[in-house]
């Protein structure tokens, strides 16, 4: 059991190193820890969630700087929850455009994509809105508020 867990951890570490090397940015322990958390969880995380999941490995005071560094190198991207909380996600292995589902109880965030037809219709509608309101729309986001399965069934989370 124990060796299993540590070998899983070391492959996350390897993967994190590969990501940093591919972007030619310096490998530091806090950067590796942050990437390992994002790779392991496979979902967008708030700064608070990252801090909790790092179990003391990343000081909250340095977390914002690490996030900024990785964001500047294009490894991670950032968006806001409906409550304007900052959320971090990996840019890698991700289609450029997707949307988010938020659990209103525990704050878990899930990525999802809508069908190509709907996405296209939405773009057409946005062009119409641009003409009607004389604006230039730069992006759109679609947010779904939900209760995740764990919260709906009353199971503890995070
Ligand atoms: Zn939930
Ligand atoms: Zn996302």
Image (spheres, grey):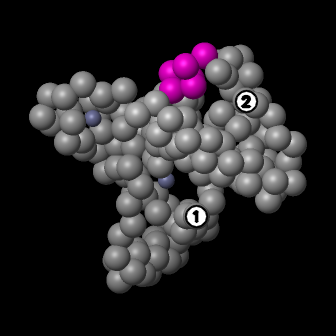
Residue range of the region highlighted in magenta in the rendering: 51-56
Residue 107 is a magenta residue: no
Residue at coordinates 53% horizontally, 43% vertically from top-left?
Answer: 8
Name the one closer to the observer, 142 or 158: 158
Q: Earlier in the sequence, mark 2 or mark 1?
A: 2
Residue 97, given in percent of the width and then of the height, sits at: 52, 66
Residue at coordinates 73% horizontally, 36% vertically from top-left?
Answer: 31
How far apart are the alpha carbons under marks 2 and 1?
Answer: 22 Å
Residue at coordinates 63% horizontally, 60% vertically from top-left?
Answer: 92
The quadrant holding residue 9 is top right
Give the answer, above or below, for where 65 lies relative to 32.
above
Label 1 neighbourhood size at 10 Å, few (<14), some (14-19), many (20+)? few
Residue 17, given in percent of the width and then of the height, sits at: 74, 48
As drawn, the label of residue 30 is 2
Circle 1 SS class: loop
Q: Is residue 147 visible?
A: no
Residue 89, given in percent of the width and then of the height, sits at: 56, 47
Residue 52 is a magenta residue: yes
Give the answer, above or below, for where 101 lies relative to 1.
below
Does residue 17 appear left or right of residue 44 in this picture?
right
Q: Quadrant of the C terminus?
A: top left
**Circle 1 sits on which residue?**
93
Residue 36, given in percent of the width and then of the height, sits at: 60, 40
Q: Is residue 116 visible?
A: yes
């Amino acid at each position: 059991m124990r060796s299993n867990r540590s070998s899983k951890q070391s492959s996350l570490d390897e993967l994190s190193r590969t990501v940093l090397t591919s972007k030619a940015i310096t490998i530091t322990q806090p950067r590796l820890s942050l990437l390992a958390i994002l790779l392991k969880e496979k979902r967008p995380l708030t700064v608070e969630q990252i801090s909790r999941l790092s179990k003391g490995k990343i000081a909250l005071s340095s977390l914002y700087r690490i996030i900024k560094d990785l964001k500047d190198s294009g490894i991670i991207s950032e968006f806001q929850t409906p409550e304007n909380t900052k959320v971090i996600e990996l840019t890698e292995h991700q289609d450029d455009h997707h949307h988010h589902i938020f659990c209103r109880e525990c704050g878990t965030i899930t990525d999802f994509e809508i069908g190509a037809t709907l996405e296209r219709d939405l773009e057409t509608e946005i062009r119409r809105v641009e003409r009607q309101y004389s604006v230039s729309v730069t992006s759109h986001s679609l947010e779904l508020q939900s209760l995740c399965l764990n919260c709906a069934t009353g199971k503890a989370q995070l």
